[in-house]
Amino acid sequence: MRIIFEMYSTQCFYNQSSMTKSNNTPVSKQEKVPGTHDNNISQGIIETNNTLVKNLTLPNQKEVTKSIEYDPAKEKQQWMEWANKYCGYSWSLRNFKLDEWVFSEEGITLPVGRLYLGEFEMTSLPDLSRFLNLKIIYLKLCTQLTKEGLASLSQATDLEHIDLRDTNISGLPDDLSSLKNLKRIDLWDCPNLTNDGIKCISHATSLKEIDLRGTNISELPDFSLLKNLNYLCILGCSNLTNKGIKSLTQVTGLESIDLFHFRISELPNIGELPNLKHI
């Protein structure tokens, strides 16, 4: 909600010849993003002529504040409109389970902490900052999703599992390390994934499981900081080279690794990894 002030006073804008009233032009209505509402009033920030005027006291502040009280039905409607716009299949909408979401002024609570967006035809994720318990996000077969479109993942600070199987992303957000609770990431059959695109994994120190099967990477990222990593899948990564898998020896906590069906002539000495139980 925006409040447009038409400010007419003796202190209005003036030119060199005479005092004139400023001509206010309506502020264009911006597109609402699901999960957000306008907090400008409560922050004392009012927009007039596209200029932010801070700390402006309104004579009827209480009335204005009351008029923009949080409406859970409105937020739910915004999410429904967003889902209907980007949901490609009826079963995806059923898995979305909007009717099971709990809306409150504090935020949105998801059933068992899961957000299902599989097969949604979107290029970027919606705002995730309102979710209170988002632990798992399913993005399988979101084929139009881009690396840049994953930016809002950093808002979901409780995330534990990101499923990006069968997407066309070229890489992951550079700030992946900000997700301190992230334990698993699935990048299975992401054909456009690049070596540079997954370098950020090196700093996601909470990761325990990484699935890179079927990707076209030729080199694994640096694993030296991933002390918690215990499972790695590189099945069918046919472009991996002898040099590209040397970082395997850095994963001292590794317990299980799947590495069949790729073309290398020599494995690094992973037999000396102290916790390795399955190859």
Image: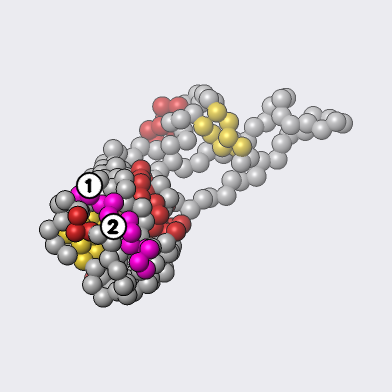
For the magenta stretch, what is the residue range? 241-253
Question: Does residue 256 sit above or below 35 in this rendering?
Answer: below
For image coordinates 40% across by 36% down, the residue present is 67
Foreground of the two, 199 or 55: 199
State whether the magenta stretch is mostly helix, strand or loop: helix
Tell us which disc is closer to us: 1 or 2: 2
Q: Residue at x 20, y 53 (%)?
A: 273
Q: Any magenta on residue 242?
A: yes
Q: Is residue 58 left or right of residue 195?
A: right
Residue 92 coordinates in the image, percent (x, y): 26, 68
Residue 24 visible in the displayed image: yes
Q: Secondary structure at mark 1?
A: loop
Nearer to us in this view, 169 or 66: 169
Q: Which quarter of the figure has residue 14? A: top right
Query: In the rendered structure, which amino acid carries the disc numbered 2?
Result: Leu
Report x, y in % for residue 140: 29, 66
Which disc number belongs to residue 248? Answer: 2
Q: Residues within 10 Å of mark 1 (few under 14, many from 20)?
A: some
Q: CA distance from mark 1 to mark 2?
A: 14 Å
Between disc 1 and disc 2, whose residue precedes? 1
The number of numbered badges drawn on the structure is 2
Q: Which mark is residue 213?
A: none
Is 51 positioned to the left or the right of 182 in the image? right
Q: Residue at x 14, y 62 (%)?
A: 278
The amino acid type of the residue labelled 1 equals Asn
> Nearest the camera: 251 or 158?
251
Relative to residue 49, is residue 84 drawn left or right?
Answer: left
Q: Choose top left, top right, bottom left or bottom right for residue 233.
A: bottom left
SS at mark 2 in the image: helix
Which residue, given by chain and number where applicable, does mark 1 sit on? 228
Q: Is residue 210 above or below residue 160?
A: below
